Image (spheres, rainbow, N blue to C red):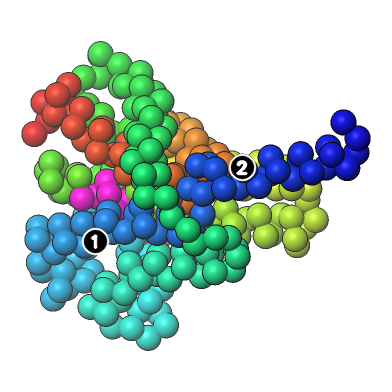
């Protein structure tokens, strides 16, 4: 094969990769459509279980999704009142993904059967973390909930409730991935690669590590409504697990994009909550 034929063949493979399942489902438009039902479900369930939120949006913090409150705080800072900031928080994700899709100049074409495969992929990706959580939660600790090593279940809630844990898991999967992966990793990459001139490989590694550590730390120490607070006592095992989970999710984000990593986080939370019932009889 001559050089020209080799170049044409390589270009054909690259085109096929971009238009294949993995290429298509990494696009922002896929992330938006895949996550939109979860975003809507989260809003409906929160309103159903906690209608007080329309009167006191700050009460949402009792749901444990700190990342959602951060978005509320940002919207409040730019001039929105509490109720409007709560309503508009989901729009931040929707608008962000639409803008990313437009600026990427990638095709908008959708293969609807891909979403079923994406669901299976997200569930499969979540399973290694489930196994790791169960290993860390050894038989001698069976009085302890599996949620004790979950990366999203902060102990800010008074007591535990199955419905609330499911809601919190969905919200955490969406909004923690937005903050700690889509926003933070992109900002860290910009800092290391563009400002400091670090090569791309090292920039990715540094960004993954820093984002994972901060992801883990924020479950112990949070910044809410302009002040720092402790969400739960520091313990080494949960911190290590959450750091590993943060690195795992960060790698998934870099390789597969926002839609897959958020979906994997959501299904991980849901499966872990169900296992709490089956294995630890916590509800």
Callout 1: helix, strand or loop?
helix
Q: Quadrant of residue 208?
A: top right
Residue lying farthest to the right in this orientation: 2
Crowd around label 2: few <14 · some 14–19 · many ≥20 (10 Å) = few
- Residue 40 has which mark? 1
Q: Which residues are magenta?
A: 167-172
Counting residues from the N terminus, which is met first, the one under dot 2 or under dot 1? 2
In the displayed structure, does residue 264 sit left or right of residue 181?
left
Question: Which residue in the protein does label 2 denote?
Answer: 17
Residue 131 at x, y = what percent? 36, 22
**Residue 238 seen by the camera:** no
Vertical order, 79 against 168 (above or below)? below
Query: What secondary structure characterizes most of the magenta part?
Result: helix
Residue drawn at the location 45% of the way across and 35% of the way down: 245
Q: Quadrant of residue 105?
A: bottom right
Residue drawn at the location 27% of the way across and 80% of the way down: 84
Residue lying farthest to the top in this orientation: 139
Is the C terminus in the top left, top right, bottom left or bottom right quadrant?
A: top left
Residue 263 at x, y = what percent? 37, 45
Q: Quadrant of residue 57?
A: bottom left
Query: How many angstroms separate mark 2 from mark 1 (CA)?
Result: 32 Å
């Amino acid at each position: 094969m001559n050089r020209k034929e080799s170049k044409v063949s390589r270009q054909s493979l690259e085109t096929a990769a971009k238009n294949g399942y993995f290429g298509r489902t990494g696009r922002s438009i896929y992330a938006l459509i895949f996550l939109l039902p979860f975003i809507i479900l989260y809003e409906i369930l929160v309103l159903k279980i906690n209608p007080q939120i329309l009167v006191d949006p700050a009460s949402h913090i009792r749901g444990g999704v700190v990342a959602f409150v951060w978005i509320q705080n940002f919207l409040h800072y730019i001039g929105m009142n509490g109720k409007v900031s709560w309503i508009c928080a989901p729009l931040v994700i929707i608008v962000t993904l639409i803008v990313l899709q437009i600026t990427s100049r990638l095709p908008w074409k959708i293969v609807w059967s891909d979403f079923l495969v994406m669901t299976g992929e997200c569930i499969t990706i979540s399973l290694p973390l489930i196994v790791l959580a169960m290993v860390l939660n050894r038989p001698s600790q069976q009085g302890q909930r599996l949620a004790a090593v979950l990366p999203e279940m902060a102990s800010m809630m008074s007591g535990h409730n199955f419905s609330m844990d499911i809601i919190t898991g969905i919200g955490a999967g969406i909004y923690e991935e937005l903050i700690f992966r889509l926003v933070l990793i992109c900002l860290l990459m910009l800092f290391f690669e563009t400002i400091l001139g670090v090569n791309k490989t090292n920039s990715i590694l540094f960004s993954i590590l820093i984002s994972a550590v901060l992801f883990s730390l924020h479950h112990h120490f949070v910044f809410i409504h302009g002040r720092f607070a402790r969400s739960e006592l520091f313990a080494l095992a949960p911190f290590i697990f959450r750091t590993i989970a943060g690195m795992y999710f960060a790698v998934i984000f870099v390789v597969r994009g926002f839609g897959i990593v958020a979906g994997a986080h959501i299904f991980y939370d849901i499966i872990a909550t169900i296992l709490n019932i089956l294995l630890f009889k916590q509800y």
